[in-house]
Amino acid sequence: MLSISQQRPISLRPPFGGQIAWTEILFCLALLSTNFPIKVYPVLFILSGVLSLLECRRISFPLWAWGLVGFAGYAVGSYLLVEHPSGSHLSSMLKLCVNFFFLFASTQWLLQRENSILLKWLDYTLHLSFILFFAQLLLYHEALGFRLLLGSSSSGQASMLYSERLYFWGLADKNMFGARIALLGLIYMLIPTVRWSRFSIWRMLLVFFLAYISLSRTPVVALLIGVLIILWTLSTKWIRVGIIVLILGISPFLMEKVLRVDQLTASNDGMGVRLTYYKAFFENIGDIPLWGMGFMNAPEFLKEQAEYYHGEPHIHNTFLSSYLELGIVGLVTFMVFLVFYLRQAFYTFRDPVFWLSCFLPLIAIMSILYSGYDNDPILYLILVFLLIKEKGTMLKECKLSL
């Protein structure tokens, strides 16, 4: 591990006093900014990252950071070597670089400080975020006369809910908005387990309600994975029996209205589209160059090889996207980054149940949605690291509470 030290870290606190530092304020603002319709988050990510590094006593480069550098460097090289008409995909390349810098800088900063004040303000930030998530979804549903409030019959119908014209907070895309609710929702539910050794039932119900009315299956599946691990760990024998009975009782509704299993293979269903793309990938994997098709060139592959193509910018799987676009180098460097990042998180506080409840939902979402460098998984990795860094109680020792 390479390490660079500085003698005296710079202290940055606002002139109006109080315990919170400018770096903590900027960190929370950076989190909020990803929800703004105007994309100002890159500026806040860079500013927050730079000031965070200035506060660090030393800067180290663990193995996961080298994996990150390798993936980003190869992606930049691929972008420069492949011709893109009119500079297209430049924004994606800049997003990759900014997000990875923010991840590295924030993790360095969090590891070297006491974060209890930051954790409290993160809680306030997520309170505000979820209030506005609810307001945004309420506005979407009101525009459709609330006729989809009890669920939709298809993925296409669910997508009707989202309107760029009404968008003021979060995202105007069903799957991405749903995934954001799931990932930030898990953090929101886990904060009380770190601050007060309690798992909050009302937070859990709020997040599931928002995930449900988002009409996206992604958050519901991801949340079920994480929350069932937590509830099973914290419950007595009879509560576990109740959980099983409840799941069996709501399964028909869950399968029909939430997961829409009867539509999974339809050509106009999100999961049906994914299965078609995955089939095209594996049937043609031998024709994909070992160096990849080129950064952001997945659409060209899908247009030629998939049975049908609906215009998505990637293949809806982080790991397949890494190999398809950046070849064996992209996949290996991304896996080095992810595996060693998760390893460092585990060794920071060795709580296997907490670790699994945090990371299994992320892996599930990455396997059906993200390209690998999107804002949400990057923010989630940072926030999970913050929770693990500040955690002092094993999850199994926490209590259920309202």
Image (spheres, helix red, strand yellow):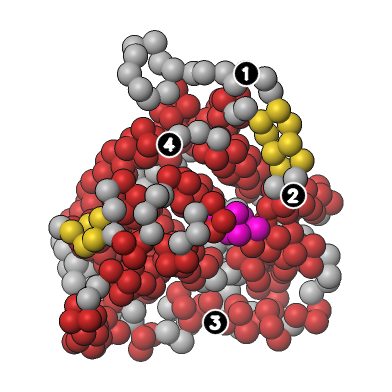
Please state which amino acid type lies under the numbered disc 3: Leu
Specify which label sits upstream in the sequence, 4 or 1. 1
Pointer 3: what residue?
A: 275
- Decide: marks 1, 3 in contact (CB < 8 A)? no
Three-letter amino acid code at the position of disc 2: Trp
Q: Residue at x 74, y 82 (%)?
A: 284
Q: Which residue does the numbered mark 4 point to in the structure image?
A: 115
Q: Amino acid at mark 4?
A: Asn
The numbered mark, 1 or 2, whose residue comes first in the sequence reads 1
Q: Kindly report the distance in space between the C-alpha atoms of the residues bearing marks 4 and 1.
A: 19 Å
Magenta part of the protein: which range? 340-345
- Of the numbered discs 1 and 3, the one sitting upstream in the chain is 1
Alpha-carbon distance for marks 1 and 2? Answer: 26 Å
Q: Label 2: which residue?
A: 66
Q: What residue does disc 1 label?
A: 8
- Magenta stretch holds residue 196: no
Quarter of the figure that contains the N terminus: top right
**Comparing labels 1 and 2, the label whose residue is closer to the camera:** 1
Q: Nearer the viewer, mark 2 or mark 4?
A: 4
Label 2: few (<14), some or many (≥20) within 10 Å?
some
**Spatial distance from mark 1 to mark 3, Cα to Cα?**
54 Å
As drawn, the residue found furthest toward the top would be 15
Instruction: Tell which of 110 and 100 is nearer to you.
Output: 110
Q: Secondary structure at mark 1?
A: loop
SS label for mark 2: helix
